[in-house]
Image (cartoon, rainbow, N blue to C red):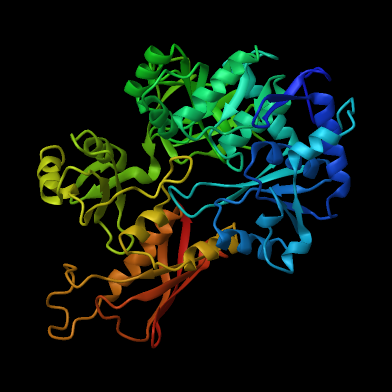
Amino acid sequence: MTTPLIDRHRPEGAILHLDDGERRVDITASRFAGAVVELAARLPRRRFALQRCERTASFLVSTCAAWCAGHTVVMPPTRLAADRDALIERFPDACELVDDATDRGPAPEAAASVAVDAPGLLREAVPRWPPPALPDDLVAAMLFTSGSTRIPRAMTKTWDSLCRGARTFAGTFGIAPQSFTLAGTVPPQHMFGLEATIMAALRTGCALDGSRPRYAADLAGLARRTADAGAPPLCLATTPLHLEHFHRSPGVPPGVARIIVSTMPMARALAGRVERDWSARVDEIYGSTECGMIAARRPARDDAFTLAAGIDLRIDADGASVVSGGHLDASVALDDRLAWRDESRRRFALEGRKSDMVKIAGKRTTLNALGDHLRQIDGVVDGVFFPSAVRPGRLCALVVAPTLTEESLRRRLAERIDATFMPRPLILTDALPRDERGKLALTGLHRMIGEVAADATLASAVARDPRCDRIARECAVPADHPSLPGHFPGHPIVPGVLLLAQVESVLRERGLRVIACTRVKFLAPVPPVQRYVLDISLDDPEAVTFTMKLPGGLAVSGTMRCEAA
């Protein structure tokens, strides 16, 4: 079975809008199809295409060309050169898609790079109709999870599942052909951006604007050009972080008719202010890289999400949930804890992630609840609680609060949370390590407080093997750890049980529960403060092997039997 690359577009209707600096250029669906076929014929015969184009038009044209050439398009999780090099190492049978020749890597990889001049291709292409069709079972895309709860994982999508997801998207938000001009701030290398801009442009009959607004002035200019051209009103796909920035900026409110947000929870107050000031409806997607869109809500009016058409959801008594049906190829267990909101079994509330639950000294709360208390303090611009990587049972916090001191912040926080959950350390910083979607990766937070090596050991391991069969982490136990006093006074060493607890903590981050430590050898003492490298192999969950290496050699080795948490 095959499905056309383009659906719901007329051959002479616009599918893409470009801005050449002087005027807006409309690219028809038939000319776009011709450019895609011409580029596909010039691509190297490879199994994979590493998508590094940052310009929307180049991304759209080259991704479609790669699909027509039968490639799986690999979407790098970051723009880091280390990730790019590691993915090339993992996928030697890949060509690189880049915006221009200066983006190419050094030889020998440069021989497999293709510079994509989208405006030139589209200007010179011979129109073609009907558009090419792709096999439904084509493994079209490989994307990576954000790493906000654990190490990023690779997820693949077939062409059929992407098309069905586009139907779910259009049906949920009532996007009819030519009803909107699509625009986005989110990179299309990530699932929300791919779904709400690239696939929406190909499958909804609406045209995509090739600009990606970064600042409020960009968005206002885009809205003005759209109105002057008599084009359909703007539908903006963005993140709550970007939307807050746009709304906070002074000036005339941008002329946006519809806003769709995702990647992080949307504050009800912000959604209400935007709807009031811009006269634009704000909708929020609940979804994931694994699933794409699952449900939606209008956060200014409702804190419950409604399942998208065709999607089924099961929630057990503990809030654990499994989603299936619709555009999903298989059932998926979600990382979040959910709760039904009514008897229809179609509306649910998000209660937090499974990994958010914190239990210390017999008391319970969630990281999400602690973060809410923190961000409600006057003077706090941004902040997050997260578990320590090297001190089991201890919480850390990073906070952006330019007008507060650590002492004053602790005093105000103590008025809101139990002392059991007071973070150690609590570090004031200029900014949190959010990615361009507004998400926070746990490894980045640990790195900021010095619990992960400053080098790229872990990041490189992740990029080399997106399945994450190996974890490499640099750790240390602080000199003030409560287990050390009395443990060989004068010459303290870290207790073996604490070292094993560190392994268990890392495995718990990966969603594994330790059933038994089947073998362990303590070969050398580990002193406090001394950094050691914890290396864990996850090839077999029933026989997880680990080592701890000091600069002078191996300190600990062992095996643990695990099961899914």
- Camera-side residue of 144 and 256: 256
131 w.r.t. 278: above or below:
below
Residue drawn 34% across the image and 43% down it: 356
Return the x and y of residue 194 as percentages of the image width and height. 63, 36
Q: Quadrant of residue 206?
A: top right
Query: Can you say which quadrant of the picture contains the N terminus?
Result: top right
Left-right relation of 266 to 146: left
Residue 88 position within the rendered picture, expressed as x and y whole percent measured from the top left: 68, 62
Q: Position of residue 530 (x, y in %)?
A: 29, 78
Residue at 48% in and 65% down: 458
Residue lying at the far front of the rendered structure: 22
Give how far across and how far down residue 476 sits, in percent: 31, 71
Occupied quadrant, residue 279 = top left
Q: In this view of the protein, which residue sits in the foreground, 219 or 409?
A: 219
Residue 3 appears in view? no
Horizontally, is 364 left or right of 311 in the view?
left
State the residue in front, 381 or 506.
381
Count the marks: how many? 0
Asked whether the viewer can see residue 438, the reply is: yes
